[in-house]
Amino acid sequence: MVPSFIPEETDPQHVIRIAAGLSSNEADTTSGNQPGVVIYDAIGRKMGSVEGKKKTILDGDFVDIQIPLDDDVGKKPAEYISIANGGDDALCIAYIAITQPDGREPAYWYPEMAMDCGAEWYPSQLKPGDNDYTPKCIWIDRDRSNGLQFQGLGFHLPDLKGTEERSNQLNENRSILCDVSPRLRLYEDFTNDDFIPFFDPPLKLSDEGCDLDTTVIMDKATWKMPDEGPNVNKVLIDSTPNYRKVEKRSVSNAVFGENPESKVVIISTNSMHSARELCESETSRGFDFVSSTENLYCDMEPKRLWPVCSNSTISACFDVSTSTMRPGKGLRGRDARSGRIPPAKHYGKTVHWR
């Protein structure tokens, strides 16, 4: 990550930078309310917190949240962090960067970690580095009025060491990431007043950030909650994390356009964006999407793929020049090959990503 995307160190505070994914614009975006943030020490005690606000993180922008340390904490780094949506406007988080007050190397978190474990997600065209990498973003929402599932998340900061060895270990065994609540968990019911589980004894990692013994972290007897504080028993840590139980369902149109004329379709020429990946994912949420590199259109509500019209495909396809679906040549407009009926979609706005 380039330095401009890492918050400056502010003594004696932690600085948490949270970025919204860059999406369409103004009316229909990945922007949302500034979330609340809590940091915890190695034994789950709160070191400091900032409440969420209804202030909006603009589309493709970020906010730096400074967290003063409590007087009895000292200048030590946080071990755990939780993020909770601060208002009723859903936020799609593209990355989180953390600067610690002890001068150690900043940590940064990309949402693919949570996406691989069932987080609801959507593409972004935000480029946080000096290359063409565009992270996906994950949704958190307070009131669930749009059908989104999760209000917040918590994760273990020492696990953010982005070495090749660490990546290989997680890719080989997703359970040590997705099924270990103190390491990473998404919460359906969560606020700044809640606590999150921690490792007891504290987790030991190799110099490359790898688990020395994966059986230890999978042992739920090593997952603990603080002895005191509000809602410490609210999150059950002895059960399978709820975000692993994903049901395929459509998103409510409350956010993504209730009136057909106000719906948005995004047409992307970015080779990192995949309409196929969106349609084949049970947890993708957001606007209908066209990948020009794949020549595919994803109708997000029923999660169905259709070809983009071309010289060789002239019916039952998405016409990018008019942002409409052409009918098929079969009976009652069906696709003569598959028998499917093309959707009668009309968009009030077409957004082009490059």
Image (spheres, rainbow, N blue to C red):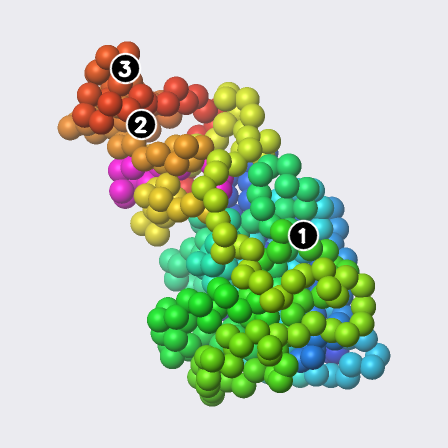
Image position of 113 with respect to 77: above or below: above
Which residues lie in the magenta part? 284-296
Mark 3 = which residue?
333
Quadrant housing residue 95: bottom right
- Alpha carbon distance from label 3 to label 2: 14 Å
Q: In the image, what residue type sits under mark 1?
A: Asp
* Residue 287 shown in magenta: yes
Going 39% across and 75% down the picture, which residue do you hit? 169
User: In this view, which residue lies farthest toward the left?
Assistant: 312
Question: Which quadrant holds residue 8?
Answer: bottom right
Query: Please, what secondary structure does the residue beneath circle 2 have?
Result: strand
Amino acid type of disc 3? Answer: Gly
- Select label 3 or label 1 by which is in front: 1
> Taking 37 as reference, is 160 above or below it?
below
**Which residue extends farthest right?**
71
Q: Position of residue 13 (x, y in %)?
A: 73, 74
Compared to residue 315, the image places residue 204 above or below, namely below
Q: Taking 348 as reference, is 88 left or right?
A: right
Q: Which residue is mark 2?
A: 318
- Badge 1 element: loop
Q: Which of pointers 3 and 2 lies earlier in the amino acid sequence? A: 2
Tell me the residue at 39%/36% (across/down): 303
Whether residue 47 is visible here, answered yes or no, is no
Q: CA distance from mark 3 to mark 1?
A: 45 Å
Q: Residue at x 74, y 73 (%)?
A: 226
| Dot 2 and dot 1 residues touching (CB under 8 Å) | no
Residue displayed at 77% across by 61% down: 231
Instruction: Report the disc number at residue 189.
Output: 1
From the image, which quarter does the C terminus lie in? top left
Q: Earlier in the sequence, mark 2 or mark 1?
A: 1
Secondary structure, magenta segment, majority class = loop
Q: Picture coordinates of residue 167 (x, y %)?
A: 40, 73
